[in-house]
Amino acid sequence: MELRYVRFIETIVAIAIFIVLRRIVFNIIAKTLLNKPIHQSRGVIIKKVLNGAFTLLLIAFVLVIWGVRQSDLLVFLGSILAVVGVAFFAQWSLLSNITSSIIIFFNHPVRLND
């Protein structure tokens, strides 16, 4: 019974860390949008990608907190990543565009009217 309360508290802490980390990253993205001549829609896309990654990490941490064995979780994640990897290999240009978009967003070497 006491173990359940500890897991519940750990879950709340993990969610709080997720919210704080997401807010910090979103503030960094907002400051980058203000300081560089980048279209606002690119910031929205970056936020969606990073929010998805943070959400997946949160789910993984919560599953580990609630007793899912790490080996089972890694087998499941490995299977998912294998399927996603095959899909991205088929659509490699999409993956390279997403990666380059994230890199260019934070390190924009060209200014408007150059």
Image: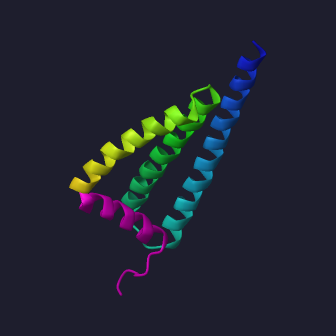
Residue 75 located left or right of residue 17: left
Q: In the image as oriented, which residue stretches furthest toward the right?
A: 2
Q: In the rendered view, tell whether residue 81 sits above or below residue 99.
A: above
**Residue in view at x 32 percent, y 64 percent:** 96
Q: Quadrant of residue 92?
A: bottom left
Q: Position of residue 8 (x, y in %)?
A: 69, 24
Q: In the rendered view, tell whether residue 104 sits above or below residue 23.
A: below
**Residue in view at x 37 percent, y 80 percent:** 112
Nearest to the observer: residue 48 or residue 58:
58
Q: Quadrant of residue 111?
A: bottom left
Q: Position of residue 17 (x, y in %)?
A: 66, 42
Q: Is residue 105 magenta?
A: yes
Q: For the C terminus, give its image quadrant.
A: bottom left
Nearest to the observer: residue 77 or residue 96:
77
Q: Is residue 92 magenta?
A: yes
Q: In the rendered view, tell whether residue 51 sits above or below residue 64.
A: below
Q: Which residues are magenta?
A: 91-114
Q: Position of residue 52 (x, y in %)?
A: 45, 44
Q: In the rendered view, tell whether residue 17 sits above or below residue 100.
A: above
Nearest to the observer: residue 25 or residue 11:
11
